[in-house]
Amino acid sequence: MKKINLILLLAALMPIALFFLPMWTIDFGAPQFPEGLQMRIYIDKVTGDDNYELKSINLLNHYIGMKEIKPDSIPELRYMPVINIIMIVTGVIFAFLRKKALFITWLVVFSILGALGLYDFYVWQTDFATDLDPNAILKATNVSYQPPLIGSRKILNFTVTSLPGIGGFVLFAAIAGGWLKVFFDYFKSHRKKLAVAIPVLTFSLLSCSPEPEDIKFGHDECVLCKMSITDHKYGAEIVNKKGKVFKFDALECMAKYLNDKQIEYSNVHSIWTVDYSNPGQLIDAKNAFYLRSKSLPSPMAMFLTSFADKNQLMTIKEEHPGEMLNWENVSNLVREEWP
């Protein structure tokens, strides 16, 4: 028998453990119960670590108006064992038939049933925690009695911990192991195609870096001062690492936004500013050249104008005398002199 059949056979047989090991455990810890109370949920029964623990849990639930947990009245405990047996038998048959398509079908169905079982357990929890007797002895307002699906939470003076049992982990291992085998088989049979596809896909994802957007003058609004962006010779943008764009009517607004840490520098992909010599054209703000001239008023009156080319700045400077700055100078200037 081939190795693949042995692995598939093992995955099909592992759910037998659900008849002997708990699928889920819910533990209740409180000062009055130093050893705690345990509820163990199997595929065909609900019990505690001993015969009295489930009775104790039901007694506590009675005080807050919860229904009694009666294993005989829970329909899932009757039909889940039958479904499990059917899946085990069909899984074993499919494994011996050595038909990959049949086993993948079994794996898909078993995965769906596992997800439905988890959802059903959540619904069951919700029903018991919310359908309370209005005449209960203990009534508490604004308190949820529902245990977490996975994890711990405080309910009154109890710490309730809900986690998969050993059987639940075995079930997960069977499903995960089956899918891993399917994946590796696919990889093995298509390794030549994947050897080409994976680098291409990786390159495509890496090359799709966030880009700035054209400013819609007269329509877009500055995220800092809320003024409409109207002057085609001024404007700025921040692009975050997720591709979201923040637009500004002036360079100084963007510097102020960054200085105030309204967006963290670690989340910034790039910053852009409008080139004065090419109205509406965005350029890299960190590599741009800046002129501060009192005869060139920017929208927020800090007299900051951006240029892509140093020679263009020097030409404009002859007509509009002022100081040439870099991005770091601009950021410090706005930090010190923002009105």
Image (cartoon, rainbow, N blue to C red):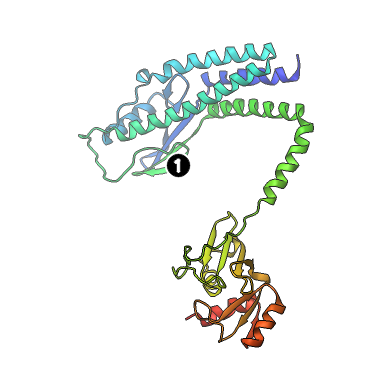
Q: Estimate the x, y position of residue 164 in percent, counting from the top left.
A: 51, 32
Report the front residue among 293 and 268: 293
Asked if residue 23 can be seen in this view, the reply is yes
Residue 276, horizontal then vertical, whole percent: 61, 74
What is the residue that sits farthest to the left in this orientation?
135
- The answer to whether 81 is drawn above or below residue 25 in the figure is above
Image spot of residue 97 (x, y percent): 68, 11
- Location of residue 156 by image quarter: top left
Residue that extends furthest to the right in the rendered view of this protein: 192
Where is residue 263? Give x, y as percent.
53, 64
**Rendered-image quadrant of the N terminus:** top right
Determine the residue positioned at 65% across, 82% down.
316
The residue that disc 1 covers is 152
**Which amino acid type is marked by label 1?**
Ser
Question: Camera-side residue: 233 or 299?
Answer: 233
Q: Total label count? A: 1
Residue 49 visible (yes or no): no
Residue ID at (67%, 72%)? 308
The image shows residue 307, relative to residue 54, as above or below, that is below
Q: Is residue 168 left or right of residue 39?
A: right
Q: Quadrant of residue 121?
A: top left
> Who's the residue at 34% across and 39% down the image?
145
| Relative depth, front residue between 28 and 13 | 13
Res 269 → quadrant: bottom right
Q: Is residue 317 above or below residue 265?
A: below
Secondary structure under badge 1?
strand
Which class describes the residues within 10 Å of circle 1: few (<14), some (14-19), or many (20+)?
some
Q: Nearer the viewer, residue 29 or 168?
A: 168
